[in-house]
Amino acid sequence: MDKTGTPYDKAIDTFEGLVEKPLEKIVSGPLPLARAVGLATTSGYRAVAIAESEGLLSRSTEGAYLRGPSTLGAGLSALGFGEFALVAEPVLIQLRQSTRLTAFLGVLSDGACAIGPFSSGRGITFVSPQRHYSLLTPVSFDADRLAEVSLAHQFEAVAAQRAVISSVSDRQDRLCIVGVLLPGTREEAGNELRSELVRAADLLCSHSEKPE
């Protein structure tokens, strides 16, 4: 939105910046996050504090900001997967820590993969995925509900990223998945990695199957 617009537009810009910035880079502390979004020190500190208290932002075990459960709840509910809002971040952080790879929750629909939220790996495995990818081939899950897929940037026909994914929950025309991004476009998942992914998928599935 145009930051020269109405106060309402500016408030929306601030909100979008606060919840989007942690997806673009690792930010720890309210002042660095405020500065990264371009907010003044005092008002920025207050905005970050309010966002965190309202659940729009949360923290990883390392203190880095993540999208909070309120933000996740709104986005996932819109896609029909709101039951994962509270459990997604802990599961993704655990999966990332056990595999040292970027772990993500995503939605498959009409040959495309929308990603978010995610927990980024560290060091040479640090990868910040795009929001949207195209699937180069149809997904075929094995007996363990696992599949390895090649993801392409939108409108391109060359693999930009490899991932191993597991199905979590269906909603008519879309499928919710949990996965990890492999470090290379030709990498394959080993047994230990596959086991960790199955464990993460089972945690999410058990949560979604709890009675209302």
Image (cartoon, rainbow, N blue to C red):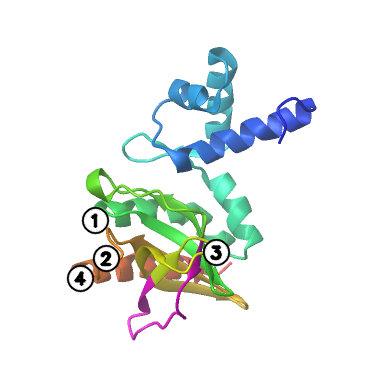
Residue designated by label 4: 190
Q: Nearer the viewer, mark 4 or mark 3?
A: 3
Amino acid residing under circle 2: Glu
Disc 1 to disc 3, C-alpha distance: 33 Å
Quarter placement of the C terminus: bottom right
Amino acid residing under circle 4: Gly
Residue 135 appears at what percent x and percent y? 48, 71
Q: Nearer the viewer, residue 206 or 119?
A: 119
- Farthest top residue in view: 42
| The image quarter in which residue 54 lies | top right
Q: Is residue 14 left or right of residue 161?
A: right
Residue drawn at (62%, 77%), measured in percent from left and top? Answer: 173
Q: Is residue 140 left or right of residue 123?
A: right
Residue 80 appears at what percent x and percent y? 62, 65
Q: Earlier in the sequence, mark 2 or mark 1?
A: 1
Residue drawn at (61%, 54%), measured in percent from left and top? Answer: 75
Q: Nearer the viewer, mark 2 or mark 4?
A: 4
Q: Earlier in the sequence, mark 2 or mark 4?
A: 4
Q: 31 above or below 205?
A: above
Dot 2: within a 10 Å radius of its alpha carbon, few (fewer than 14), some, or many (20 or more) residues?
Answer: some
Residue designated by label 1: 98
Q: Nearer the viewer, mark 4 or mark 1?
A: 4
Q: Nearer the viewer, mark 1 or mark 3?
A: 3
Based on the picture, tell me whether residue 116 belongs to the magenta stretch.
no
Disc 2, disc 1: CB below 8 Å? yes
Residue designated by label 2: 196
Q: Secondary structure at mark 2?
A: helix
Residue designated by label 3: 155
